[in-house]
Amino acid sequence: MRAASSPGRYTRFLGSLEDATTLDAAVEAAEPLASRLMSQPRIRSIVRGDITGIPLHTILTDGPFGAWWSAVFLDFFADDSSRRSAQRLVALGVIAAVPTALSGWATWSGKDRPLKRVGIVHAGANAAATVVYTASWRARSRGNHRLGVRLGRAGAVLLLVSGFLGGHLSSGRHASRQGVLHA
């Protein structure tokens, strides 16, 4: 019975983000740049996934997500080779986050206002994760592996939050319209 009530809480949380008009200022600030990213028909076609059937952002998220989670796995091993590999994977994730973010903003531009509000929080969690992973890479590259691992694990928590929100965005469904909040 407890498991059945959990989705209701998550749906209520997502619905509260969709209805959070306090996020509208951030939405309005981001809209001009995001719209410019989609202004070219060819770019719009690539970002939407007209050729592949899968939006570009959905494909690109595997880069930083995979690199960072692989680094978390390697951090369980104490040998120098695993440490070097984890450091390189963290750097790869930071680099891959840039095109992933750009494609995300471009995709975001086509969403309606409630999903754009969720997208702002999703982008914030991604930006925070990227900053934390950048700090992790710097700590590792300066010989402070222990701090780098701790920061990597903190970044992984942010990735989980971001992934949850991103999954909701990609579903295209509205939590606030499912009768949960306004029943």
Image (tube, rainbow, N blue to C red):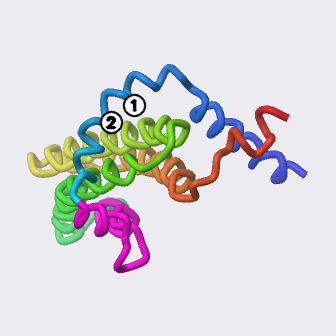
Q: Taking 80 as reference, is 135 above or below it?
A: above
| Marker disc for residue 31 | 2
| Marker disc for residue 171 | none
User: Residue placed farthest to the bottom in the image?
Assistant: 52
Please provide percent x and percent y for residue 50: 37, 74
- Is label 1 in a helix, a strand or a loop? helix
Quarter of the figure that contains the C terminus: top right
Report which residue position mark 1 lands on: 27
Q: Residues within 10 Å of mark 1 (few under 14, many from 20)?
A: many
Whether residue 16 appears in this view of the structure is: yes
| Kind of residue at badge 1 | Val
- Is label 2 in a helix, a strand or a loop? helix
Please provide percent x and percent y for residue 111: 47, 47
Please provide percent x and percent y for residue 19: 61, 29
Part of the protein shown in magenta: 41-69
Q: How far apart, in angstroms, are the residues tagged by discs 1 and 2?
A: 6 Å
The quarter of the picture where residue 8 lies is top right
Q: Which residue is drawn at 52% across and 42% down?
A: 115
Label pair 1/2, CB-CB below 8 angstroms:
yes
